[in-house]
Image (cartoon, rainbow, N blue to C red):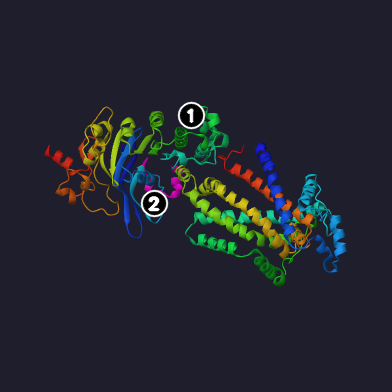
Amino acid sequence: MGKYILHRLIIAVPILIGISILTFFLIRLVPGDTVTAILGTNYDPKLAHKLRSEMGLDQPVILQYLIWIGHVFMGDFGTSSFTGQPVLSALMERLPITLELALLSLVVALIIAIPLGVLAAYKHGTRADYASGTFGMFGISVPNFWLGTLLILIFSLHLHLLPSGGYQPLSKGIGENLRSLLMPVIALGTAVAAVTMRSTRSAMLDVLNEDYIKMAKAKGASNARIIWKHGLRNALVPVMTVVGIQIGYLLGGSVIIEQVFALPGMGRLALQAISNRDYSLLQGTILFVAVTFIMINLIIDVIYGWINPSIRYK
Amino acid sequence: MNDDLLLDVRHLKAYFRSKQRTVKAVDDLSFTLKKGEILGLVGESGCGKSTTTKALLRLIGNQKKEYLEGEAFFEGEDLIKKSDKQMQKIRGNKIGFIAQNPMSSLNPVFTIGNQIAEVPQMHQRAAKNKAWSIALKMLQKVGISDHETRAKQYAHQFSGGMKQRAVIAMALAGNPSLLIADEPTTALDVTIQAQILDLMVKLRDETQAGVLLITHDLGVVAEVCDRVAVMYAGKIVEQAPVDELFHHPQHPYTKGLLASMPKIGSRKKLIPISGHPPNLYEMHGGCLFQERCPFAFDRCKNVEPPLHKIAENHQSACHLSSERMNSF
């Protein structure tokens, strides 16, 4: 297992380099650069030229990239050209917020979706099944920003139950912290719950037709035992794959949700960096998000191997 | 009642209903099984063999579209009248089930030992380590070498024959007095088949459990069974001790089955039974075999022949055999 994880981490390096190349060049394709963003309406060609040479932006793009990636390998992500703050410390401030939002959304979604999917499969063709199917359709079709706005309208503006935005760190108490994340988690997690619920349902339906389920019944196992012990663990195998894919959605969706709920996470940082053409900040942010994605998927793969013993990691 | 009698099935019916039609998969089936006896239930695909086992275990009959009727006295108690909760205590405990397909009958995500140990855990409320030692003992009993290592392995690490041994170990773990084996060797290689059959006979000798062996393979029947019941279209058409049936088959269907079985050393061409089994939802009166029977005559069209005693322990459902009896 240790060997497998090491192997995966080594494979991650070229992936990350590829991602860094893509972001590096794509952001430079966008009209305007850091200097035009800093100077704004006070644009002066002479000053701009001076700033560009100070920042190294007058050098060939490939050279710029090599210098940047060389620094990254040594742990230096540079400084934000807009605020002057080191990129790494900016990222470290923001990363926990996004991670908490994404993981909390994932956990809540799974806790709701998996039992619901199992129930829908067990009671398939009944009202409970149709009700959860309707929830599934709703969750997949509703855009998260719309759901977020709706939640703010109802729970903040009308009922005054929850804050409309802003993040309360854990240091202010876990209750406050969760209160500030409750609506974002619902807005972000609903779609994940819907997709997971549907895949759990179909996986469970397949599993319940398997011979080993009939065998368990012939052994005298109760229905509860058949479903939760013999069925669920098998059904989770395909579900975990779907969950792995959903991680990407969660990290991408957090960009929008952080905007809707004014949460100072990685997503907002990335948006800021794009509109400011803050190259090193954006590159650092994307790289961090990519690392997060790869790490969470690695964790899921390890869980996958634990659920399904016929997968041997070598 | 006979003390040796283990299973007494009387007029068992299992129908599947849909909006348009009713499929009479098992229709008025009666047979008995003694302690320590191996009864072969033979017939071609779709004749209701597997449905019979499912009905006895009450794996069917719980849904609206499944209709179950008749009696099946097992150790004096009628299985058909039991609730699902009561059946849970019988399945795997007093009645062991050996499934048709060992390849897919083991749960891929639990160890073999875990799956066997589950049986005493459920039925005898055995503690974990006690159940585990029972599982080890069962694996040893079914001839799995290095059973302590094997118990910790998963189904995908087992070969086909070993999987079937594991399934048998699972069926035996509750120490059942009745074993129902649904085509236990069909999915296996011929060499492995013989081993599994030997094992079943050996286990029967040790435990004195009654065995209901479902198969379509007459070779298997000849090798292990004490008595045979031949099924056709949901009914038993002939029943006799195994030697009697092979040497003096009475029913034309049994004769047909025997004639279509290859014999070693014989150069004779095999004679197939012409035609197809009847649709189980469009049955008309009379003998169900009449359309394929070379000896069919007028009465076969109108009157369904009852299972008739033609000798001690030998019954046949054919007008011809009953007539021959009467003429004696």
| Coordinates of residue A284 in the picture (x, y in percent) | 76, 53
Question: Residue at 60% across / 45% down in the picture?
Answer: A304
Question: Residue at 79% across / 46% down in the picture?
Answer: A70
The magenta-colored residue range is B74-90
Label 1: state its secondary structure: loop
User: Which mark's residue is nearer the viewer, 2 or 1?
Assistant: 1
Relative vertical location of residue B155 with respect to residue A229 in this rendering, above or below: above
Task: Check residue B89 for magenta coloring.
Answer: yes
Is residue B249 in view?
yes
Q: Tell me how many marks there are.
A: 2
Amino acid of disc 2:
Gly
Residue ranking furthest to the bottom = A158
Q: Which residue is mark 2?
A: B61
Question: Residue at 15% across / 38% down in the picture?
Answer: B325
| Coordinates of residue A123 in the picture (x, y in percent) | 49, 56
Question: Residue at 63% across / 45% down in the picture?
Answer: A301
Left or right for B99, reference B231: right
Relative vertical location of residue B108 with respect to residue B22 in this rendering, above or below: above
Chain letter of disc 2 in the image: B
Relative vertical location of residue A276 with respect to residue A224 in this rendering, above or below: below
Left or right for A82, reference B225: right
| Coordinates of residue B155 in the picture (x, y in percent) | 51, 37
Which tag, 2 or 1, sits closer to the chain's start? 2
Which one is in front, B112 or B216? B216
Q: Which residue is mark 1?
A: B144
Amino acid of disc 1:
Ile
Label 2: state its secondary structure: loop
Quarter holding the N terminus of chain B is top left
| Coordinates of residue B143 in the picture (x, y in percent) | 46, 28
Is residue B4 in view?
no
Task: Check residue A55 for magenta coloring.
Answer: no
